[in-house]
Image (tube, helix red, strand yellow):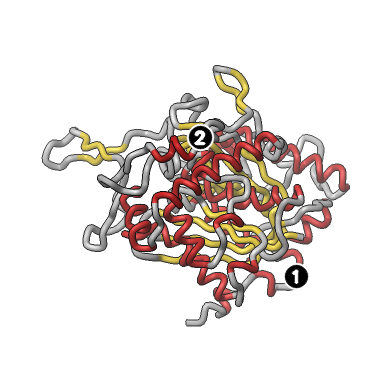
Amino acid sequence: MSYLSSSHRPVTEQQDPRRIPVVVLGRRTPFGRTQGVFRQLSAAELLTPVLVELTAEIAERDAQSGSSTAAAGDVNPARIDDVIIGNAVGGGGNVARFAALDAGLGVTVPGLTIDRQCGSGLQAIMLACRMVAAGAGTRYLAGGVESCSTAPLRAHRLSSEPGRPDFFDRPAFSPPSLGDPDMGVAAENVANRYGIDRGRQDAFALRSHRLAVAATDAGDFADEIVLVTTTAGDIGADEGPRRRLSAQLLSRFPGAFRPGGTVTAGNSCADADGAVVVLVTSLADAQESGWTTILRFVDDVALGSDPTLLGIAGGEAARLLLDRHGLQGDALGGVEFNEAFASQVLASLDLIGVSENEANRQGGALAFGHPFGASGAMLVLRLLQQHRSGGAGAGLDLAAISVAGGIGLASLWNAE
């Protein structure tokens, strides 16, 4: 089947502005290290303040533009149709619904929580875009949240010893016959297969931290971060980026997953806590409400790949997406690729012909940490904010991520 069949047609081919999805606004918590500043907060407690901030800003914009139809006392003045949130290691239930209620959106806003592991946040945004394109609704709050600090312990019930739990660290992502390596082992597999040496991995990790620190110092994140109240006070800054990290220090880290390996704690991301949410709406609604920076959704791909080389899956999805649109990597304006491990980012960028110096211009998960369910949403927020600040290049933008089990997600965007 052709990838340009009607079931995979780019939404920009639809001319009705009420069915052209755009992202116009985004907010996030700071990202905290696991068992760090947010160690006592659940996923819902991280997500709720972001939803509160976003709905207040949306309602205020509507009032200023004269597009508001909210009546006095309306519990949903921002006119949100649904809240779609990615979450990977939570305790089940529906964190999107819980946080939407806690944020005061009203009982009529349903809430949907999805799990595509570390691609969940990007998948949530892609799904919201497709919902707008389908005419199912107009306004969606979409993104992701993760609290690795408070994630529940997981256990199987032992049939041989009823009542005794068999605890495990992670579920299986693929059948043993196909191979189901741990993430770090898979990163080593990618490094070996695609020739990504230790020096290049360390240099990319150092670049991530330096860019994140520079962006923080420049105030690039000030407008997007929502203060989160903890028992230790209000937290308003990312905890992960390391100012004193050096090439010399990185060179001292031993292989973390194989003796003599090139993947280390220094060139791998750390687990983290955080939430990211954006407003997905239609182009018609964005124009009526007066949003001046618009990130138009163009197209997306979800693609399966070899589970033993799962880190390259995002690159393979991105290559398919670029091929679909007749694009070369060097024609892209902005590229955000989740930095779970330096090896897999570098291999994926090589695959699509993007210079590593042109991607992740404000750093990535190697510096900020990786709150699994939220990281994919962070990619879209970064693209939006870079255009808002004038720091993005010309051309279509790409957001991509590799996911446990060998799944790649990639999305194309056009700023205007």
Q: Are marks 2 and 1 in contact (CB under 8 Å)?
A: no
Q: Residue at x 48, y 66 (%)?
A: 351
Q: Which mark is residue 346?
A: none
Element class at badge 1: loop
Residue 352 vertical placement versus 175 (above, below) = below
Is residue 360 in sight in this rendering? Answer: yes
CA gap, disc 2 and disc 1: 50 Å
Q: Amino acid at mark 2?
A: Leu
Residue 23 is situated, as x and y percent measured from the top left of the image, at 69, 54
Residue 115 is situated, as x and y percent measured from the top left of the image, at 45, 50
Considering depth in this image, is 222 or 177 the residue closer to the camera?
222
In-image side of 338 versus 102 (left or right): left
Considering depth in this image, is 329 or 282 the residue closer to the camera?
329
Q: Residue at x 34, y 64 (%)?
A: 306
Residue 95 vertical placement versus 345 (above, below) = above
Return the residue found at the far top. Answer: 232
Residue 393 vertical placement versus 4 (above, below) = above
Q: Residue at x 62, y 72 (%)?
A: 10
Name the N-terminal-most of marks 2 and 1: 1
Q: Amino acid at mark 1?
A: Asp
Is residue 44 in sight in this rendering? Answer: no
Rendering quarter of residue 63: top right
Residue 28 is situated, as x and y percent measured from the top left of the image, at 62, 39
Mark 1 closeness class: few <14, some 14–19, many ≥20 residues within 10 Å: few
In-image side of 263 versus 46 (left or right): left
- Tell me the residue that label 1 is attached to: 16
In-image side of 239 versus 152 (left or right): right
Q: Which mark is residue 245?
A: 2
Residue 286 is situated, as x and y percent measured from the top left of the image, at 78, 55
Closer to the observer: label 2 or label 1? 2
Considering depth in this image, is 158 or 182 the residue closer to the camera?
182
Residue 372 vertical placement versus 48 (above, below) = below
